[in-house]
Image (spheres, helix red, strand yellow):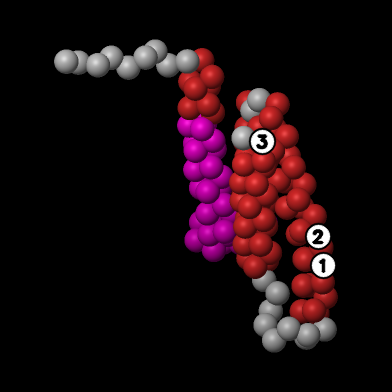
Amino acid sequence: MNQLKPPEQGYQSRIRTSNRRLYIWTGAWLAATALMAFGPKFLWNKAVVFTMLAVGLNVAGMIVAHKNLIMEMDELQRKINLNALAITVGVALIAGIPYSVMDTYDVIPFHADIGHLLMLMSLTFAIAHRYGMRHYR
């Protein structure tokens, strides 16, 4: 016997469309980041104007994508996301400034790289977001 799927509900459809849009924006941001990182060396021979345009495209694209994502969320999703972002910014400031100072005065035996801070921020956001999702379940 053939079983029919129930019609997709409006909320689920909106979430699926929102996620699809986020994936597209993330891909565009990844392409803009690659352009920003490799364009000066391989495409335009370190021309400052093109490099600044690539940086602007990267930053503006991510701001617009994140704004659109937040606007598509319902009230609870916004609360969880913004709380996770607030915790992430706090942790980044609290950890980032001493990390930089320790590098400046050679307290740590390695160079303080922004990648380390980005990993900390990513983990912090993921944990805070997951906690928020479980808390409001």
Write down the region rendered in magenta.
19-48
Which of the pair 99/28 is nearer the observer?
Answer: 99
Amino acid carrying label 3: it is Tyr
User: Which label was assigned to residue 97?
Assistant: 1
Q: Which residue is mark 2?
A: 93
Q: CA distance from mark 2 to mark 3?
A: 27 Å
List the single residue furthest toward the left. Answer: 1
Q: Secondary structure at mark 2?
A: helix
Q: Main secondary structure of the magenta part?
A: helix
Q: Is residue 64 above or below residue 98?
A: above
Q: Quadrant of the C terminus?
A: top right
Q: In the picture, residue 67 is in which quadrant?
A: top right
| Residue at 69% in and 38% down | 80
Tell me whether the residue at label 2 lies in contact with that at label 1, contact meaning CB atoms closer than 8 angstroms: yes
What residue type is disc 2 on?
Answer: Leu
User: Looking at the rendered structure, which numbered label has been put on residue 136?
Assistant: 3
Residue depicted at x 54% and y 63%: 41
Which labelled disc corresponds to residue 61? Answer: none
In the image, 76 versus 62, the foreground residue is: 76
